[in-house]
Structure formats: C-alpha cells, structure tokens
Amino acid sequence: MHKQKQKPGRQGLGVALVLFSTICLSVEPVAAKIAYRGGATVMTTLTLRYILAAAIFWLLILAGGYAFRLPRRQLLAVTALSLGTQTLTVMALFEAFRYIPAGMAILFLYFYPTVVTILAFFFLKEPFTWRKGLALLLTLAGCAVILGQPVNSLDMRGVVLSLTAALTYAVFLVGSTRLLATIQTPVYNAYVSTILALAVGGLALMRGQLNLSFSSEALVAIGVLGIVSTVLAMAALLRGIKEIGASRAAIISTFEPVATAVLGFLVLGESLTAWQMIGGAAVLAGVFLQRRA
C-alpha cells in the first residue's frame, strides 16, 4: 500500500516523529559548542558521543531480540560506507562549528540535497526534472549570497568544512538507501554508531587528542549529543520515514536550520545578518522544491 493511503493517524504520527527528530538534530551544534567551551576537544566529544549512542543501540537490540549478525558482504558494505562518508561528515561538521556560527554551518550542510539529486540521477536512475534543476539553482544562489559576506564575518575554513560534510553526507544517504532495503534499521544504526566510535576514538588516540579533562557542563553536553542528537534523532527519523515517506520527511526536516539558528541565538548569543538570512531562505527554498520533485 502506498504511503498516501495510510490512515490519517499514522500520517500524523510520522509527521510528529520527523519533526521531533529535526528538533533533536538542531540541538547538535549548540551542545557541541558548549562541550568545546567546557574544555572537551572535537575528537573527545565525538568519541564519547558515539560510544554512548552505540551502547544504547546495542542494548535496545538485545532487549528487542533483533537478529543482529550480518553476512560478510553486508558488514563490509556498512563498514566502508560508515568510514568513508559518515565519519568524515561528523568530523568536518564538528570542526566547522569552531569557525562559523552554528546556524551557518547547518545551512551549508543543507547543500547536501542538491548533491543527492545529482548522485541519484547517475546511480539510482532518478530523473533530473525542471523542479530539481530550479532547486539546484536556488541552493547555489543561496550559498553564493552567504559566501558574499565579508571575510571577517565568515571564516572560510568553516565554510569549506561544512560543504565537505554536505558532500560526504549525501553519499552516505544514497548508499544507506540501498543497504536499508535488506538490513533492519535498529541493527543498521547500531553498526554505524559502533564503527564511528571505533574510527573516531582510534584517530583521537593516535593523535593524542583524547582528553578527559573537561568540565561537568561539557559532560552533560556530550550526553545530550549521544542521547538526543544521535539515538533519539536517528530512531525517530527512520521510523517517521516509514510512515510518511522520505520525500515528506525531508521537507519537514528543513525546519532544522531554523531551529538551530534560534537555539544559537538564545543559548550562544549568535546572530545572523540580513543577507545571510536571505541566502539561507534561498537554500531552504531549493531544498523544499527539490524534495517536492
């Protein structure tokens, strides 16, 4: 049965779950900056975040009695995708938070739907319609407006890191679309979180950047990242997609940059210029139009 024919109650549940996931994700950059302010390094924050998330996911799998063993081919595919894309995504994004406002980093991250459109055309055989073309122009125009700001107001290191995260995240989503057709989502989440924890933790140890000398405020922020922005966000988003479909879920998820900007203003005292807000609106308009396509 098509998603459009589901009962209104199920549709409402799906919308609520995706919106909840979006709000959980909007907490991520704010919590990350609080962790940094409390003395936690980027690598320490990411390592502890994914260790906590992986532990919770595996406990849920054991409690739910899921069959979690994967064939070697699937395990290799999940490992390669997690290491090659998702690990780079989180590291680039969290580094970007150090150089530019949280709202700006998330807006640049939302360039990823345009990349997904291009990758889907070549690898998933999805048509490139006029709606998608117009969405691509809007997204690029929005980024151009934001990049047109003075250098002293927008650190280019943060811009490049955020765009890198957008590219790798797009690849991760396209790859995950195929893998989730044969792997249960809780099991997939557990493996991805575990691989991320091992990869980031190992890199932190090799670089000597795993430092546990941070404040209690940073510890709470890391806990929020692991539970709210990882476990709850991933679980709610994937369940919501099953109820209303990926397209509608993506449209609702465009609320994330708005929520992030508001939280950054309220909690961190960050601000957005008028031109940056106009550019962000163009980016979000492009994402919305693309997802309608």
Image (cartoon, helix red, strand yellow):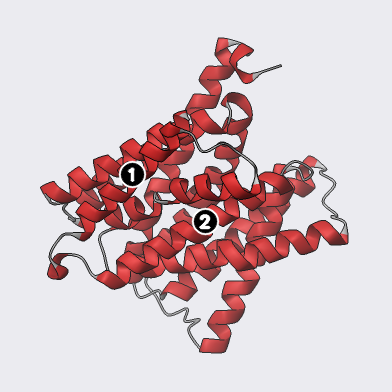
Q: Secondary structure at mark 2?
A: helix
The spot of residue 44 in percent (x, y) is 48, 74
Left or right: where 199 falls relative to 269: right
Left or right: where 123 falls relative to 163: right
Q: Residue at x 58, y 75 (%)?
A: 201
Can residue 19 be spotted in the picture?
no
Residue labelled with disc 1: 137
Dot 1 alpha-carbon crowd within 10 angstroms: few under 14, some 14 to 19, many 20 or more? some
34, above or below 264, in the image: below
Q: Residue at x 50, y 63 (%)?
A: 89
Disc 2/disc 1 C-alpha distance (Å): 20 Å
Q: Quadrant of residue 161?
A: bottom left
The spot of residue 242 in percent (x, y) is 64, 30
Q: Secondary structure at mark 1?
A: helix
Dot 2 alpha-carbon crowd within 10 angstroms: few under 14, some 14 to 19, many 20 or more? many
Q: Which amino acid, by three-letter code, is at mark 1?
A: Leu
Residue labelled with disc 2: 169
Q: Are marks 2 and 1 in contact (CB under 8 Å)?
A: no
Mark before the other along the chain sequence, 2 or 1: 1
Q: Nearer the viewer, mark 2 or mark 1?
A: 1
Q: Nearer the viewer, residue 99 or 156?
A: 156
